[in-house]
Image (cartoon, rainbow, N blue to C red):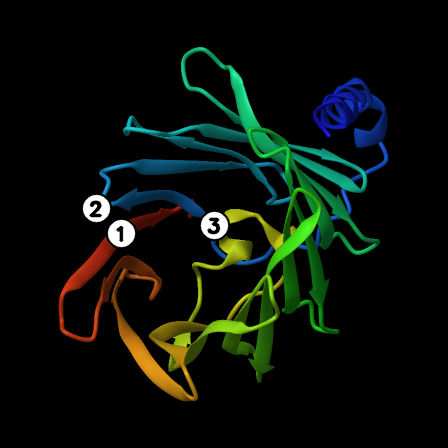
Amino acid sequence: MRLKNILVLALVMMLVAFLDSCGKTALNYTGSKIATKEDFSTGVIYTYTYNDDGSVNSITQTASPSYTNSYFTYLHDTILQENKEPGTGVFLNGMCYLTNSIGLADSAFGLKQLQNNTWSYTYDANYYPMQINYYTYNKLYAVDQYNIVGKNINSIEHFDSTGHTHHWDYYAYYASNTNTLGNQAIGENYLGVQNANLIEYDIIITPVGSDLDTTDIIKYNYRYDTSGRPDTVATYHRNGQMIDSAIYTYTD
């Protein structure tokens, strides 16, 4: 597996100039793009840069106990994400996404430290995710199944390697608040469309024997900028304890 990943990576890098001339197949990019995200719990600031078509070019981070800078290369039907150590530029790990004819990732494999991991993706006719399969050492170890209602993810059922449900996430939304924090907002349209609205609640339900237990209810609170976009997001457990908060800025 290691030799295979090294050979694939080498081939990808050698063909950059030629294949890039064939054009990128990613979906069209519209709406505001996120410029920075500051995570209060870690103190890390993420800075995003974009290509002319709106696809993500790089994600760099300020210092933290463990962090990497990510760089993206688009090669016709392949998207290469390289995660490098700041300062030295050492290639630590990464992912290689293989996209279909409309630019959606239908599979991916890990590189370097992630070399034993692979993923597969399916979508509905409107480019919303339907299922993500996770593999390690070529064995299935988890599955996420999505249920879409309208233009939002209604629920995600998480299965373990035996096919049993580990837990569900059920979502409720602010009906009048447009989501500007999804995949499209950070130039990762190749992972599909996300919610049209901002999440208000994430209700986590876990099977316990023959019963179901509501493990937690996570509340999302937002503050908005003058353009009506969220510039601050705070999340809370159902007991009122804060989980995390983040500040966003936009490129326009």
Per the image, label 1 sits on a secondary structure element best described as strand
Residue drawn where x is 80% and y is 18% of the image: 14
Q: Residue at x 49, y 54 (%)?
A: 185
Tell which of 34 and 141 is nearer to you: 141
Give the farthest residue toward the front: 209
Relative to residue 243, is residue 59 drawn left or right? right
Residue 101 occupies quadrant: bottom right
Q: Mark 2 and mark 1 in contact? Answer it, CB < 8 Å.
A: yes
Rendered location of residue 232, percent (x, y) = 25, 57
Reply above or below: 37 against 64. below
Q: Is residue 121 above or below residue 199?
A: above
Helix or strand or loop: what does disc 2 sit on? loop
- Mark 2 and mark 3: span between their CA atoms? 21 Å
Quarter where residue 233 is shown: bottom left
Secondary structure beneath dot 3 equals: loop
Q: Which mark is residue 33?
A: 3
N-terminal of the pair, mark 2 or mark 1, is: 2
- Percent position of residue 246, x then y: 27, 51
User: Which numbered marker is on residue 40?
Assistant: 2
Residue 82 visible in the picture: no
Label 1 belongs to which residue?
A: 246
